[in-house]
Structures are given as C-alpha cells and as structure tokens.
Amino acid sequence: MSSSRNIALTVHELEAGEFYWVLMEAVDDTPGETSHVYMPLEAAHDPYATYSNALVAGVAVMRRLFGPDGRPA
C-alpha cells in the first residue's frame, strides 16, 4: 500500500476578482473508485487578485506542507 496522500488543490472566486486557494484531502479513498470525497485541510485567509496567483500560492503551501513525496515535511 502506498504512503502517498490524495491531496487536491482548487481555487475559488468567492467575490468578483477575489481568488482563494483551498487544499483538500481525500477521505474514504477506496482503490479503483472513480470519485472521491474531499475534506478541506487548509485555505487562504486573504484573497489573491488573479486565479493564477492563488494557484501558485496554493502550490507553494502544498510543497511546504507535504514535500515531493506527499508526506508531512
């Protein structure tokens, strides 16, 4: 069994021009399933002006938290 975690990053535009990244982790991850249920792990507290800025910031947090192999850094 793999020790990797199923982490997802998404960006939400909650108000026009205000973008927030959200990191989520799959729960009830059954091998072979085509869909997953995700629970929020961490999210931006302040908005970003563009989708791409929020996405890049979310990736930076994901790298800091989970490193290249998906384990807590």
Image (spheres, rainbow, N blue to C red):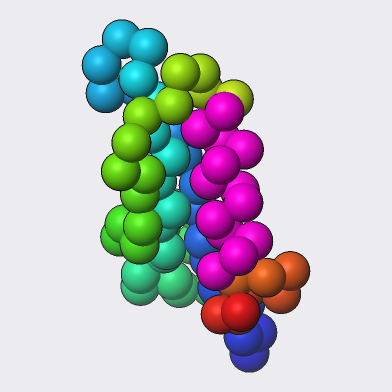
Answer left or right for 18 relative to 33.
Answer: left
- For the question of whether residue 31 can be seen, the reply is yes
Most extreme residue toward the bottom is 1
Most extreme residue toward the front is 46
Tell me where the magenta segment starts and ends, as one range.
Answer: 53-65
Based on the displayed image, in which of its 4 quarters is residue 67 positioned?
Answer: bottom right
- Say how many tags the image has: 0
Q: Is residue 50 above or below residue 54?
A: above
Front-most of residues 32 and 71: 71
Most extreme residue toward the left is 15
User: Residue 71 magenta-drawn?
Assistant: no
Q: Position of residue 37 (x, y in %)?
A: 34, 58
- For the question of whether residue 38 can be seen, the reply is no
Q: Is residue 66 above or below residue 41?
A: below
Most extreme residue toward the right is 68
Rendered-image quadrant of the N terminus? bottom right
Q: Position of residue 40 (x, y in %)?
A: 31, 57
Front-most of residues 33 and 72: 72
Rendered-image quadrant of the C terminus? bottom right
The residue under the point 41% across, 64% down is 26
Q: Is residue 66 above or below residue 45?
A: below
User: Residue 63 magenta-drawn?
Assistant: yes
The residue under the point 53% across, 45% down is 58
Q: Position of residue 17 (x, y in %)?
A: 37, 12
The residue under the point 62% across, 51% down is 60
Q: Position of residue 41 (x, y in %)?
A: 35, 62
Q: Main secondary structure of the magenta part?
A: helix
Based on the displayed image, in which of its 4 quarters is residue 65 positioned?
Answer: bottom right
